[in-house]
Amino acid sequence: MVDAGDDFIHVQWQMMSSDLSKDEKYLFNFKTGSENPGLEIIDLEKLKLDQVIPMSLEGPNGIRHPYISNVYLLSDGSYFLSNSYDFFRFDTEGNKHSTLTFSNHEFTGDKLPDGTRIDLNQTLSEDEKSIVTFYSDEKLENAPLGFTVFDLENESFYYKPLDILKELEKYRINLYFNGYPSGAMFSSFHLLAKNDSLIFSNGGINQLYFYDLETDSLSFKSYNSQYTSYEITKSFPGRVESEEEYRALIKDSEKEVRYGPLYFDRKNEVYWRFTSEFDRMKGDTTIFDIVLTAFNPQFEQIGEVLLQDDFVLPYKVFIKEGLIWTFLNMDDEVAFVRLKPTLK
């Protein structure tokens, strides 16, 4: 449990908008959607709320609205905040140094084709010099069309179409109201920038794809699990007009296999991944198989383990000193469940 003193740590967004400091001593959690937005700094060694950096919506340090989707802590102590539309850079004193608006940037190089936009999925490169995103149709009605690279150091931009992304989307349900899209449910895409490669995957299939930026080449690896299905097998309608039908389909789709993103463990030099799939009903409780898988730096699968029935699939995961930390909401208080895998 984390001691918040007389305050309450912001847990309404499951700590999704947070990042681990480079020295692995602090977790910075943005109070997304709060009436009083700010960055909460949690001391992971003392397990207590250390301080809160207040943020403003207007003025020279304004972030426009309180919904921040990504926090990126940098090696020099500064940080990026992103709302998936704007990309802000702040120094250690909380002063905003730059704003990059994805839809109206002035970087040199390519321009996205008409009718397309930057997708919500993004990642910071390992050297902290580039932001990599997917791009999609304007209404986000379909799978991503490819990826983009914003070179923050040289202020340049380019994009690359990838046809394979369309094939990777195993199911998608779009809800329409009066002919307009008003909601969507789909298998998640995961994106990771590592050296000169982009590693991406889709939550509906046990594969990893590798795009080499230097050679402009694409490769992939497929894996097998003794505990979960290889891929989603059920078909879902791509479009529904009824909210009742939409919600029923979402509930049904949640039973399908879901492969999560990769998390790098610097101490053990492995990548970890969580996977979930419906197992059975226990009374009114749904029991899922939750599997933890390990990959070596060459992305070869080196082991997997089925976790106990009461393990809660985490919304937030980070790796600290070889332990896997997962966030757990305990009656609106912050707890961390720590896993210590043994590699043999």
Image (cartoon, rainbow, N blue to C red):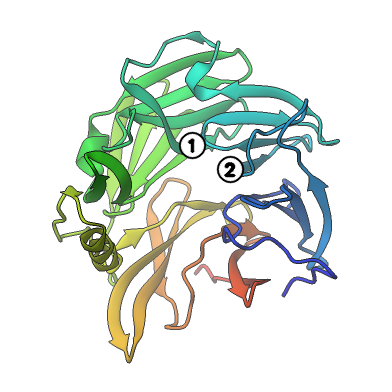
Closer-to-camera residue (144/127): 144
Please state if 44 lies on the left or on the right of 322 as rendered. right
Q: Where is mark 1, residue-wise?
A: 122
Please state if 169 lies on the left or on the right of 95 as rendered. left
Q: Decide: marks 2, 1 in contact (CB < 8 A)?
A: yes
Asked if 158 appears above or below 223 in the picture, the reply is: above
* Label 1 element class: strand
Amino acid type assigned to the residue bearing label 1 in the image: Gln
Which residue in the rendered view is the most extreme toward the top? Answer: 108
Residue at horizontal 37 percent and vertical 57 percent from the top: 301
Position of the N terminus by quadrant: bottom right
Residue at horizontal 52 percent and vertical 21 percent from the top: 150
Which residue in the rendered view is the most extreme toward the front? Answer: 178
Q: Where is mark 2, residue-wise?
A: 70
Q: Give the quarter of the image for residue 179.
A: top left
Per the rendering, the mark at residue 217 is none
Asked if 194 appears above or below 118 in the picture, the reply is: below
- The local crowd at label 2, few if under 14, some if 14 to 19, many if 20 or more residues have their Cα within 10 Å, is many
